[in-house]
Amino acid sequence: MIIAYHRPKTLDEALALLARSEPETLPLGGGTVLSRPGPGRYAVVDLQELGLNQIEARGGRLEIGAAATLQQMYAHAGVPAGLRQPIRRETTYNLRQTASVAGALVTADARSPFATAMLALDAVLVWDTGEETTLEVFYAQPERRKKRLILRVAIPEGVSCGYEAVAKTPADVPLVCGAVGSWPGGRQRIAIGGIGGAPFVLREKTGAEAWGSFDALIDEKLINAHSQLSEHINLQSNYFKSTILILVQRLTAGQAVE
Amino acid sequence: MDIILTINGMQKNWEIAPSDTLLAVLRREGFFGAKFGGCQQGECGACAVLVDGRPVNSCSILAAQVSGHVIETIEGIGQHPEQGWKKTGGLHPIQLAFVESGAVQCGYCTPAMVLAAKSLLEHEPNPSEEQVREALSGVLCRCTGYLKPVQAVLRAAAYLRGEIVPPVSERIEAPEGLFGDNQSGDFSPEGGMPGNASTMTRIMPQISLTPQTESWRQVGKPEIKVDAVKLVQGKPAFTADMEMRGMLIAKVLHSPLAHARIKHIDVSKALALKGVAAVLTYKDLPRVVYSTAGQSDPIPGPLDSFSLDSKVRFVGDRVAFVAAESEEIAYQALQLIEVEYEELPSIIDPADAPKPGAVRIHDEPEYVNFADSNPEKNLAAELRIDIGDVEKGFREADFIFEGDYEVPKVQQAHIEPHVVITYWDSDDRLVIRTSTQVPFHTRRVLAPVLGLPMKRIRVIKPRIGGGFGGKQEILMEDVAAHLTIATGRPVIYEYTREEEFIAARSRHPMRVHLKTGVKRDGTITANEMYALSDTGAYGCHALTVTGNTGHKSMALYVGDGPYRESPNIRFYADVVYTNTPPSGAFRGYGVPQGYWPLERHIEKIARDLNLDPLEFRLKNALRSGEYHPFSKSWSEGREPRPEIIHTVGLEQCVQQGKATAGWDQKYNNAEWRIVPGKPNLRRGIGVAMVMQGTAIPYLDMGGASIKMNDDGSFNLLVGATDLGTGSDTVLGQMAAEVLGVPLEDMLVYSSDTDFTPFDKGAYASSTTYISGTAAVLAAQKVAERIRVRAAKMLNARGDGPEVTPDDIDLADRKASAPDGRSVTMSEVGHDSLHHSDQEQIMGVASYVSPSSPPPFAAQFAEVTVDIETGQVTVEKLVMAVDGGVIVNPVLASGQIEGGMTQALGYAVCEEMRYDEQGLALERDLVDYHIFRADEMPELETLFIETFEPTHPFGVKAVAEIPMDGVAPAVGNAILDACGAQVDVNPTTPERVWAALKSGNRSGFTRKIEQ
């Protein structure tokens, strides 16, 4: 339960609040998750007056303020066109108006279209310390939510995004989804969502490389993911494997055929 | 903490808690237009308001976050145009368009939709349909299928652009030749751009009229729903939309185990918590066995439930009740209740229930059997229906086809959760204000449970935010009532969405085996169905739902030739208890469970024998003048009585439906199946024919009373329960037709056990037919008195020849003589109450029908299948319905569109699953997806009117039949597209993929050629 609400006007003030050990204090972006009733007693620090909702190109990257909403990002001209579909499928139209980009990434589960696509784009989280963490590393850290404050999320400029998903209906949470980031130099990176605790990077290659076989790679991922299969997923592993292979083929426009 | 909020232009300081959501604050302050949909992740959107012009779910944002921002709620959008001397701007154009277009059904999500539309139109005055669908996609609607809300927004956009908008009532008939090439139904506005959907999207459905309707002025017209203006303004019309001083919040401790005895329960810590007013366990309440099913007396099922018991039978079963000063305290109290359980073996798979040695779920001595229920075998009901000589029919067949099928447990998912408020009134009578489909059954059933005489209970049904059968249950009224009795205070109990999934009712899942004998020429000689039906932990509706599975589906195909005279049909079923949440009533009431197997099976047979699937079906289908084959054998657990079916419009439904669907061009067409440039996609088209029922003969009773007022208006009081369907409106239309007045002169009220006549409630597709006949009969009594008085008044004038009451015609608010002289209704009403031979002109009537005339329909579905992943996209649904005369085409088509959409979920995505411990895997509307506005297929409704002679206006029903055919039509379309035989519903990508990999192309488990 939220026992105190703060709306600091400076970053320093916010960081000081977040640094407290008592009460536990959490950053509040859109509030779509923290406003839910839940266990524990904690304070929240609303980021809305810290200027963290800007989206701008800087240093070859598109930097998205942590408190920018999914809808802001969806509508931003600098966002790769292929990223719009996963943003749109992340949550409902109304929730996109308030859900923050950083909040969506931090709370994402394996079925998140947005997180899968951002993983494929090798998104980076920029912390208040100046430290940067790739989303891939972040998802590999079990304690990922214990960090301090994310200021921005950055994706490289000029990278295109492809997205494919299989779902029971067009707007349902995907059973399996995949995204590919394609850099101008030929680098490509495929991420898969739907199994395990979070989306994962299936493979990355440089322009000179061929994709090679995905068969063993998918088997390995499925075995690793099996122990943490979401309760929502009750699909057979052979269906997963087949579908991931199909999505990979589509994402790579037929380059990956094995 | 204090915050400043600007709501609807008014700035005010508010004192809030840091954890308060905006929704909580708004509702606390009387902004009841923002609704609580029970969800905890903001997935339903019924609570949406505008924050700085954007639609925001007020349940998913803290009130503190919006301090300093501009908030708009529905209360600030528009007003009723007539408020006495005060001039108002009237409804906002968006509200007006929603009202006119039939976009308001239950009205629970309407304020959120109106606000979403306002946000869109303020920055995009000429939106595309796609943009409208996107804007509405944040708000879930379970009633409309979204078509009419989309049309309403497009219409509103035209209003706001200053365009002339044509009336909704422009009717498009469906004569020979049908609808030409203009399949979309759009027509271009004068001076408008072709293809720009905007204002000209057709709202009236395509309709083939009966000649009897030509002279009618009210019946058959798209009158505005009588409650639409109130609902579109977000007025406090629903159960929870009221505040009472001292009202307590109720919460229930639910069982974490599937099957256990409570060895010890200690509530002392919970009771000691400040703010807790009462904690009740089984030790505190009288042990009264009852059934929660909302059905007429005697309940046709076992009595196997208690308000609280020392045993729990599913995860989610009740353990204790708490009433507290706040929700937060109530939840804390639940955590302080200490329970020691003795865990028992549990049954999750229904196939395990009847096995020897299986644990007995109901071992309570108070258990009351009904018919063939047998708790020793975990059997809630057993059905054994034999019609004709089935074995002889099989011997006479050239082929025997057998197949196995499965249908899932699914949730009604009405957006308004179950909710009740109870309180003692000043006469010490217990008032139960509840969102129910069955107020009179609720009063009758609860009286012994609460230890109160029935006359000391009053049940009020306000507006209902959808029910779909889920509220044909006395599900949770007892919780609040017990707590009011314990504390003497008002109590509100409102389900969360999770409780809807773990502790409400749902559709019976079934495993079905079909065996069909067919001659080479396609004559069905015998048809046999066995269903294993899972009623969950309690037997509410067990017998009747499952009985209807056979009664309505297996009755459709009687065979041809001599078999038509004497059909051979068998329906056997075992309805078993399991340790899962109870099943119950859900729109369709067992019939969709029958049509998935039947219509998949029939399709397979047609293809196997190389028969035209439409001709094969029609050759064997029931025809008018024939007996309902089950009417001599079964009637919901009561004495069966033979019944002739007078009207069957199935052939016309097929003809018109297939033309609209483009069947002849698409079915079995290899070229059409291919999607250019998409080698992984295949198109397919499928069909299903279905029939339902209209009421339960000799049982369902509805009453109505009508009184005339001084001004010539009438109060129509009905016990019938409008749960968003528009039944108040169509009952009003029928009465208005008889009385010769416009609908606006009928003041319709439903329902209150103190003030309105008895009605069995809203179920079994009975209201228009049964309650409607009662309204007509009551109106006829009133009309007769009006004629008597009018004749007397005209004769007293002495300005023309003498007239008798029989000469008087009622129309246009007048009682007219043949020579044109007339008195107005107002004059008659005024005279009757004030001037001469004063009397209250009033009529009371009730009706029980000896008939249950089935509606019929042909359902078509078009799909695209991804043959690599199994993903199915439903592109178009066309339903041609014979529902008799359609009283209100716009409201009726809304029923069909909404029903098809609900059935679409049943077809492709909705499914409630449990793990081995009986824990529900789906607990919200994220994991249990229901269709949104931006992913809908094209919907087309055709009404093929027949005149049902057993009703004064020739009506049958339309409410439930749209649930029946979509799933099998989609399954058959998948088969047409790619050859996949999917026999387990819903047709998820994995199941389609597995079917494609399977070698069984015929889909039969056995085929014998004799």
Image (spheres, coloured by chain):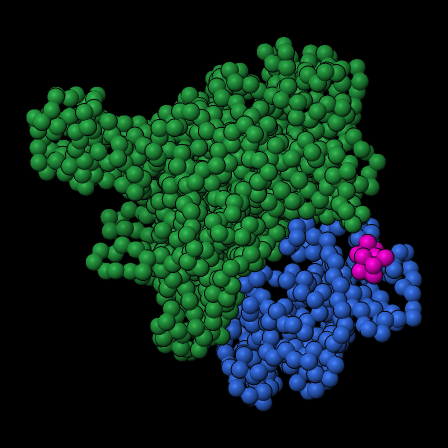
Chain colours: A blue, B green
**Residue beneath the point at 59% across and 32% down:** B657
B6 in relation to B268, above or below: below
The total number of labels drawn is: 0
Residue B267: x %, y % from top left: 48, 59
Residue pushed farthest top? B562
Residue B190: x %, y % from top left: 47, 49
Give the quadrant of the C terminus of chain B: top right
**Residue beneath the point at 18% across and 35% down:** B824
- Is B394 within the magenta? no
**Residue beneath the point at 61% across and 46% down:** B937
B282 in relation to B19, above or below: above
Magenta residues, dominant SS class:
helix
**Residue beneath the point at 65% across and 44% down:** B875
Residue B327 visible in the snapshot: yes
A79 in relation to B286, above or below: below
Give the quadrant of the N terminus of chain B: bottom left
Q: Is residue A118 left or right of residue B161?
A: right
Residue B246: x %, y % from top left: 33, 61
Looking at the image, which is closer to me, A187 or B752?
A187
Image quadrant where residue B34 sits = bottom left
Residue B62: x %, y % from top left: 49, 71
Residue pushed farthest bottom? A12
Looking at the image, which is closer to me, B430 or B96?
B96
Over which residues does the magenta segment extend? Answer: A244-254
Looking at the image, which is closer to me, B940 or B902?
B940
Residue B328 visible in the snapshot: no
Q: Is residue B933 left or right of residue B789?
A: right
